[in-house]
Amino acid sequence: MIMEKALSSVEVLPSKSSQVTAVKVVVQEPETKPTQRGKRVGFVLVHAGAGYHSESKAKEYKHVCKRACQKAIEKLQAGALATDAVTAALIELEDSPFTNAGLGSNLNLLGEIECDASIMDGKSLNFGAVGALSGIKNPVSVANRLLCEGQKGKLSAGRIPPCFLVGEGAYRWAVDHGIPACPPGIMATRFSLAAFKRNKRKLELAEKVETDLIQLKKRRQSHEKGSSVMCSACGRPERPVMVGKGGDQIELYLLENDLGTLDTVGAVVVDQEGNVAAAVSSGGLALKHPGRVGQAALYGCGCWAENTGARTPYSTAVSTSGCGEHLVRTILARECSCALQTEDAHQALLETMQNKFIGSPFLANEDGVLGGVIVLRSCRCSAEPESSQEKPTLLVEFLWSHTTESMCVGYMSAQDGKAKTHISRLPPGAVAGQSVAIEGGVCRLESPES
């Protein structure tokens, strides 16, 4: 059977920093469901990015999360590895034109798509990743293949197999290992092309504004008089920001990255044997410099998975989303995994987001710290006291947390008829980049009767 604690209500808690708002979820016990005879158990939690999810597109985000959960569960029920299940979920998320991963990813400064992805197996602790990869429809499939090939051992002449490849080398390796190439024109969608054109225009406007500011400073240094300066850029962006002081104020034009469109995707999975896996995939920041690699490809930053062991009483899996540079400098995925080894998972995650992310000394000069995580931890536990049979039971705690305006998630167990989805949002008055929301639940998975 499965006992699942459902989302009920939220309350604002006082926090250690006056700039941080902690949101605690109050949970309730719903009705239990019987385990179907012969069905394998497992659980998946996915996310479609931490950023901003408009109400107009909420249906599409939720729908792709549902499909991703269903793909992962189908793999688990068929007896596939946790890594194959998490890969199946990511492929579904990459194929959506609404997410910034795989198909429809953000375009870089040159109008090209370069993707990052990684995967980690909690059982073997092996890792596979690609960075700045072009010409492959599903980057996570290459990351998974790297992981699988690495598990086979050394190459000829005792060479160490790669676990992380970038750029042209990653593309050639993928094609050589039977992963089909994808024409660049197919990867860009009308959504991503339209966003690229908008962002290019904003960049041109911003560069004109910055030129005006430099000229103004030069005039002041030359003792030229003047109380104000007008921006020479024409038009007006969606969200201008004033920079400078007094009469030196001019408008700065923000790219859509700053408006919250950070739709990196990810998933975490636990299978019937208690093995965990995690994966993440991203198209990176809009108008990023060619060759830039974000957290989605980097060890300990984009994802983490680790089975229970001598020093780890819980199996944990983590996938991150948000501003890659913020997540890289805090190694957030690894930090969350370590924190989840304490008794109270909710409190541990909250303190990590507050102290190791928003309050990190490595990000002390940032105005706002943007990111989000999904986490899963599991452990074996005894059957219910009233039960006369000793059935293996897997207790799964799952949480998501974000400092962005919103985060879209979906989750499903192998015994559920359909996936559940939710768009988590910061409460009214909370400031993105300075506040943290945290929600989640618990489920108990019992092995099916033979």
Image: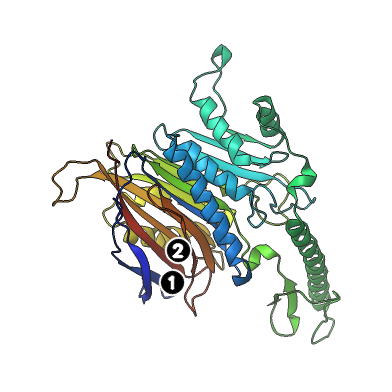
From this view, report whether residue 211 is shown above or below residue 149.
Answer: below
**What x and y, as percent, mark residue 86?**
49, 42
Residue positioned 53% across, 41% down in the render = 87
Identify residue for label 1. 20
Query: Which quarter of the rendering shows the C terminus?
Result: top left
Quarter assignment of residue 306: top left
Q: How is the image coloured?
A: rainbow
The residue carrying pointer 2 sits among few (fewer than 14), some (14 to 19) or many (20 or more) residues within 10 Å by Cα, namely some
Determine the CA span between mark 2 and mark 1.
9 Å
Q: Amino acid at mark 2?
A: Gly
**What x and y, as percent, mark residue 371?**
52, 60
The residue carrying pointer 1 sits among few (fewer than 14), some (14 to 19) or many (20 or more) residues within 10 Å by Cα, namely many
Residue positioned 56% across, 64% down in the render = 366
Residue at the farthest bottom position: 227
Is residue 294 something one can see in this rendering? no
Quarter assignment of residue 5: bottom left
Residue positioned 66% across, 47% down in the render = 102
Q: Is label 2 in a helix, a strand or a loop?
A: loop
Q: Are marks 2 and 1 in contact (CB under 8 Å)?
A: yes
- Classify residue 376 as left or right of residue 444: right
Q: Amino acid at mark 1?
A: Val
**What x and y, as percent, mark residue 436?**
45, 67
